[in-house]
Amino acid sequence: MELLDKARAHVDSGAFFAELAALVAYPTVSDAPEGRAAIQAYLGEVLTPALTALGCEVTQHANPDPAGGPFLVGTRVESPGLPTLLCYGHADVVGEAGQWGDGRDPWTLTADGDRWYGRGTADNKGQHLVNLTALRLLLAERGDLGFNLKFLFETGEEIGSPGLTEFAAQHRDLLAADVLIASDGPRLDAATPTLFLGARGGVRIDLDVDLRPGSHHSGNWGGILRNPATTLAGAIASMVDGHGRIRVPALLPPELPESVRAALDGVAVAGTPGDPVPDEGWGAPGLTAAERLYGWNTLEVLSLGAADVDRPVNAIPGRARAVLQLRYVVGTDVDGVASAIREHLAAQGFPMVSVTAEASFRASRTPVGDPWVSWARTALNAVADRPVALLPNFGCGLPNHVFTDVLGLATLWLPHSYPGCRQHAPDEHLLAPVAREGLVLATALFDALGSAPPQVTERPQ
């Protein structure tokens, strides 16, 4: 296992840390105008040389959606008869919200024990650096990869991947492959190597009860004017009760497939020290915590307000608003979410509640029984220190549907982060042991693809 020893040594020597520090230094914020220049520099000064070093022909492509940034594609063809791997990563990061601890600069990589702090360390620069490094180590060891390689980088994942679906549809030949292997999101916990096959989708739901232009004295008008805050609270309670159980059948999946239930059997969530403890009696009854998180839908209230909570006055507010989010799994019909909620609220006596809904990433996953899944799990378990957890999908959103639904690929996500990484928040960090193990796992998986790919004759749908 000399190749895997080299992967471990690359992290232990500090070389990986130094490379990651150079990546973190680019403030590639996709929702800020000043970040666009940093993104372009990151593509040209970091990713293009990295892909060129792998023997890739590199091309940059304009985004068909003006709201999004460019795409970068690297292509290495060793032989038409070999399997083709598509990798994916995103160059952009979120902006800053709040102060980082101990005066840390988000654009300077700093180590505190096993925690490497910096914006993008976990999401997604550290993760795509692991995969680029694993490919580089494999190429240096063997002289070839043993497969054809395509690497797609987008620059707007943090703003919903605008244009990615259209780009993939327009460039199916350019992105044609046999399998996607990518890294984003967290593993099950810090200690458990994880393979997940897709992602839940998300729908933002805005509720607005706008009854009158201003507030009215609660002593003079209380009892005869409808209170929009009370109305909104009742409307929400009719949709999701005080124990987190969804009460609108149209917002639920039709079933929990047996293959998903079997894959999640024995999976324990919140296994990292410091994780919050899952609340008993919360969410869909009759399901385990893993089934609720990875196999079912949840309706969460993200924000709720009327008037000034910090300085209340004796007045009935004129307006109340809330933002909810439906996290949903494959099988849920979300195209008619807004109309289904309106019908439900009208039936409950709340026709005055305005409803708008907007979907972001769509739910998608590769079937658990796909031959690529068993192949990857076998290859990873052969080198992992503990059994690899298999999740049919993880709980958050990713553009997995682009690869399954548009490009028709099996999707294997090997994450190199963990749930407590603080992504999107101050003090985002990558754990050194996870980076080290991740580089070993990625190197082993790519090596297996080059030496013993699966014999796939037909993929289940």
Image: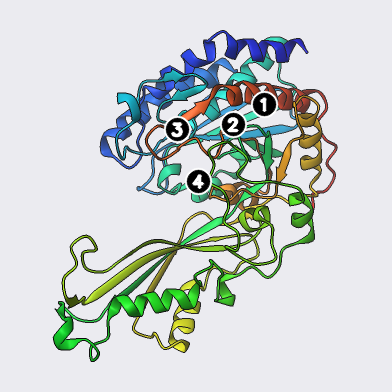
**Is the residue under label 4 in contact with that under label 3 (CB below 8 Å)?**
no
Please give the name of the residue rendered at 21% of the width and 75% of the height, measured from the top-left corner.
317
Q: Quadrant of residue 136?
A: top right
- Tag 1: amino acid: Ala
Q: Earlier in the sequence, mark 2 or mark 4?
A: 4
Q: Nearer the viewer, mark 2 or mark 1?
A: 2
User: Which of 75 and 17 lies nearest the eye of the viewer?
Assistant: 17
Instruction: Say which of 290 and 165 sits in front.
Output: 290
Q: From the viewer's perspective, is the residue at label 1 or at label 3 nearer?
A: 1
Pick whichever of labels 1 and 3 is earlier in the sequence: 3
Residue 1 percent coordinates (x, y): 78, 13
Query: Looking at the image, which residue is at 53% across and 10% down?
Result: 15
Task: Check if mark 1's residue and mark 3's residue have beta carbons within 8 Å.
Answer: no
Nearer the camera: disc 3 or disc 4: 3
- The crowd level at tag 4 (other Cα within 10 Å; few <14, some 14-19, many 20+) is some
Which residue does the numbered mark 3 point to in the structure image? Answer: 91
Asked if marks 2 and 4 touch (Cβ < 8 Å), the reply is: no
Q: Residues within 10 Å of mark 2 (few under 14, many from 20)?
A: many
Mark 1 is surrounded, within 10 Å at the Cα level, by few (under 14), some (14 to 19) or many (20 or more) other residues, namely many
| Residue for point 60% across, 33% down | 190
Q: Are marks 2 and 3 in contact (CB under 8 Å)?
A: no
Q: Contact, CB < 8 Å: mark 2 with mark 1? A: yes
Please name the amino acid that badge 4 sits on: Phe
Q: Residue beneath label 4, please?
A: 167
**Of the numbered discs in the image, which one, if any, rests on residue 416?**
2
Circle 1 SS class: helix
Tag 2: amino acid:
His
Taking the spot 27% from the left edge, 38% from the top edge, the residue there is: 33
Residue labelled with disc 1: 442
